[in-house]
Image (cartoon, rainbow, N blue to C red):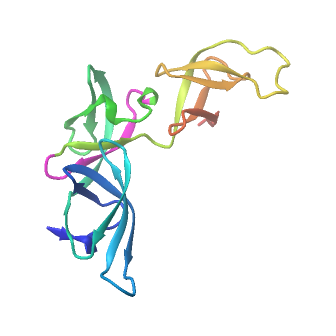
Amino acid sequence: MANTTDIRNGTCIMYHNELYTVIYFQHVKPGKGSAFVKTKLKGVVNKKNIAVTFNAGENIVVVRTMNKSCQFLYKDGDYYHFMDQATFETLLVPVGSITNAEFLADGAVIDIVCREDTQEPLTCSLPPIITLEVTHTERGAKGNTATKATKPATLSTGAIVQVPLFIHIGDRINIDTSTGQYTGRASAS
């Protein structure tokens, strides 16, 4: 069992029978009274942010986690299937666990945080910027480039994003996975 002196940013703890990650912590020793630890926690499953104050020395349950680099294989019903790059084992991740999953391309490698004891996936994060190919878009009107006009474009994963008028079918573009917005053309390599 750990106590409040073990709290660090990124630590995963069990609080009221739910998993939370420590976003921020501060040890406070007031001039009068006993010391305490102010924290901001983010729910692993429920994604809620909460502020919690612990008394100094209070026992907490720390959940050990590990990062796995996994390759996306396919989606089957309510689960995404990933292959662990180190052990070649298959991990099943529930559909709601991945934010902006519409940008998840076949063969993409992402980081999955798992519990060390049960190997249960906790969080999955796409890379901040991903490159995808445009499979369908309408042609832009010639000469209409003075304004910042956009048009919808369908990507190779099926996601639809707004792109500038000069983007055509077959172009590879960069997408910000946190906002789902076009950030620029992919560099030719």
Q: Quadrant of the N terminus?
A: bottom left
x and y, in percent, of residue 72 in the image:
33, 32
Task: Name the residue rendered at 67%, 12% in the picture.
Answer: 138
171 relative position to 42: left or right: right
Task: Name the residue rendered at 32%, 55% in the picture.
Answer: 21
Task: Name the residue rendered at 44%, 32% in the picture.
Answer: 100
Residue furthest to the bottom: 31
- Would you say residue 116 sits in the magenta stretch? yes
- The image shows a total of numbered marks equal to 0
- Would you say residue 99 sits in the magenta stretch? no
x and y, in percent, of residue 139 in the image:
71, 12
x and y, in percent, of residue 81 in the image:
26, 29
Figure check: 52 above or below 133: below
Q: Quadrant of the C terminus?
A: top right
Q: Quadrant of residue 161?
A: top right
Q: Nearer the viewer, residue 5 or 38?
A: 38
Q: Nearer the viewer, residue 66 or 52?
A: 52
Figure check: 19 above or below 80: below
Q: Quadrant of residue 34?
A: bottom left
Q: Quadrant of residue 79?
A: top left
x and y, in percent, of residue 85 in the image:
28, 42
Figure check: 156 above or below 109: above
Specify start and end residues of the magenta stretch as a single range: 104-118
